[in-house]
Amino acid sequence: MPRADATTMRPSRAALLFLLIGNIVIGSGVLAPAAMINAMTVDLGVSAVAIGALIGWGAVVLCIGAPAFGFLTNRMDRRFLLAASLVLYAVGHAASAFAPDYETLFIIRLAMISGAAIFTPQAASAVALMVPEARRASSIALVFMGWAIAGAVVVPFMSIFAETMNWRYLYAGLAVAAAVAAAGVVLLMPAGLYPARMTLRTWGGVLTRPPILFLLGTTCLQLIGQFTLYPYLAAELRRATEADATGVALVFGLYGAAGLFGSIVAARTVDWIGAPRSQLICLLTLAAGLAGWSLFSTSLVLTAGSIFVWGLGFGAAVSMQQARLIAVAPALASASVALNTSVLYLGQALGSAIGGALIAYRFPSLLGPAGLVFLLLAFAASAWAYRRFAA
């Protein structure tokens, strides 16, 4: 069975572009309930916590699915695998558009979210196979800029359109976008992309490497910190600042634009300052944004500024972490990146649960401070991995 050689393969810019588009669709689908939370609660007759559960329980599936699918699909061509995951995502979103009630929507989401569990980590491993080491970190940052673009462009527009049209049309749009991305991957990615075969013993070896464990812990903590607040951001903006639909969309737009800007800067500078330093800067930026929210959550103007600062680190933090893991053990990238995706979604699930509990027990003002604590812990773990293991 042929193997791709990263030292000789010359992937087209279009192939990397469609991996970027795939991540835009994946990120948009994962974050969609947060953008449409106000409209969905009214239409489906459920609470904000129930809509947040779409993200939280979906994250549980992603947490389990990322390493499981990474192991089970180890012998599959990455081009076919990535395209199939996007097709699953397209079918799931199309079915969601016709879901008659919350329970049906919940079940469909848990099924189709497996596409995200496959695509996100395996796109990174595919880049590691296609791109020479000297350009690997910046190429990964480019591909994972899709999440920042989702936050900068798609999520704000979804929050606006969800107020003016049926949210189901937005799910249908995501289905079409996923299908287009799948077609682009099939047509433009090189064939014969097979990662190094991973046995159960090899996976165990990944989990016994201290640098990898510290980096995985950093990922989990930073996502807990952010998702303590993020799934409920639109609802909290209305509660705390009395923002209308336009104000909520503006804040999401600032958040996403900052994430896109931060991702571009990180992609352009990572080869110069290194992925570890880039990620530490991202974590400090995230913490500063959550600190601002904690102090100024009743002022729309100051809250918007704080969320802009928060967004600066959002898009780049994950891609820098992927680059660090690949640099620690390039041959194990398929496993380590899958595990990173797993703990990323574990962090989303735990953060969503913590935030939901704070709202349910009538402590919404603690969403920001609780998230800040986890981000500071993430910074400490990341700094230790860099100083102790140069990872």
Image: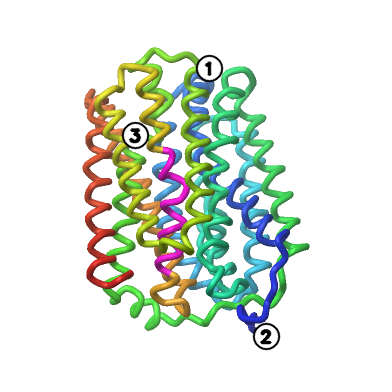
Place of residue 95 in the rendered image (x, y in percent of width and height, measured from the top left) = 64, 40
Pointer 3 or 2: first along the chain: 2
Q: Which residue is drawn at 25% across and 59% down?
A: 383
Place of residue 298 in the rendered image (x, y in percent of width and height, measured from the top left) = 31, 17
Pointer 3 or 1: first along the chain: 3
Place of residue 343 in the rendered image (x, y in percent of width and height, measured from the top left) = 36, 57
Q: Quadrant of the N terminus?
A: bottom right
Residue marked by disc 1: 246
Q: Residue at x 56, y 77 (%)?
A: 195
Marks 3, 1: nearer the viewer: 1
Residue 379: in sight, yes or no? yes
Q: Which residue is drawn at 26% across and 28% down?
A: 294
- Residue 105: quarter of image: top right
Residue 172 versus residue 88 in the image, above or below: above
Q: Does residue 148 appear left or right of residue 180 in this picture?
A: left
Residue marked by disc 2: 2
What's drawn in magenta, residue-wise? 311-325
Q: In which quarter of the image is the C terminus?
A: bottom left
Pointer 2 or 1: first along the chain: 2
